[in-house]
Image (cartoon, grey):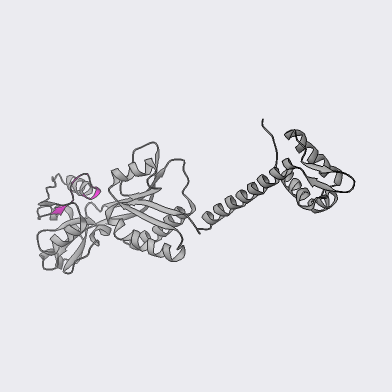
Amino acid sequence: MVINWNAREFEVFLTVAETLSFRRAAEQVHLSQPAVSGMISRLEESLGVRLFDRNTRKVELTAAGSVLMQQVLLLRSQSEEAVRAVRNMAELRTGSVVLAAMPSLAATVVPRAFARFAALYPQIRLQVVDTLSGPAFDMVRSGQVEFALTAANPAYSDLDYTPVASDRFVLLIPLDHPLARATGPLRWADIAELKHISMPLPSSVRQYADAALLQHRIRFTPHFEVEHLATINAMVAQGLGVAALPELAAVVAPQSGLAHRHLIDPDLQRPIGLVTRRGRSLSPASAAMVELLRKEMRHESPT
């Protein structure tokens, strides 16, 4: 049996049940007494049971009326709790932010944004997954994370990519290296023969370095290939080679005694973008986090 009741009918029923007076109930709900009586009669007819015993002297709830009153009170309480839960989420008093970020962002921009966000919204749970673009796309698609920050544009019909910043390439070199005394930018072709320390494919850092040197018909052959940016920084600091890195990656686990020089010809700009599921809105907490991340990345981006 499908019964089409509305919130107004529940309100009228509860008012009669609480006042045990059709007259007083009518005054409280701003309806005429016949309108209230008609509404209760329709409820009784739809349920097939009497809700009130009434005569000229008094009104009393029947057993069925008492059961309905308990259930309507429970429904009202649940409705109020639902409204509170949604308002708490909308006003960032509850919720969570789970994102994936490539290593250079997970070690620089994300922690600063998390710190600012935690100070503003201490009740929101925060989690970051440090991973490369490919796994990040899969995590967004599966719902393990709500969004990802990557340097790659996913070629998938179910994902959206929104550019948020860009990151120039620099050469990371020891301070005692002859190129450290240079005052201007360096050309990719001029640093091709140096001992390079780079990340393996399919990292975006390696792909960009390969592409930059291919423009000069030079095949990029790093002397060392390592997975982690902190290792690259440490190896350069020990004089084992140089590293062509995006600026955000170059400042991960900084070592003393290192210099940065911008690389040009080509002047690469690694785009950093927001990856989300197509057709899905971000939660209020994640939307607020994205704005903080945008501000942090604008601050980090070179002028």
Comparing 298 with 156, the one in front is 156
Question: What percent of the width, then of the height, locates residue 124?
Answer: 45, 58
Quadrant for residue 142, please give it. top left
Residue at the location (12% across, 54% down)? 196
Quadrant for residue 258, please give it. bottom left
Is 154 rendered above or below residue 166? above
Judge whether residue 106 can be spotted in this image. yes
Question: Residues in magenta?
Answer: 196-205
Q: Is residue 197 magenta?
A: yes
Left-right relation of 51 to 215: right
Q: Mostly what secondary structure, the magenta segment? A: loop
Comparing 104 with 51, the one in front is 51
Comparing 183 with 170, the one in front is 170
Q: Is residue 156 magenta?
A: no
Q: In the rendered image, which quarter contains the N terminus?
A: top right
Comparing 213 with 197, the one in front is 197
Question: What percent of the width, then of the height, locates residue 180?
Answer: 15, 66
Left-right relation of 92 to 219: right
Left-right relation of 247 to 143: left
Residue at the location (33% across, 41% down)? 138
Q: In the rendered image, which quarter contains the C terminus?
A: bottom left
Residue at the location (17% across, 44% down)? 214
Left-right relation of 274 to 2: left
Question: What percent of the width, then of the height, locates residue 150?
Answer: 32, 49
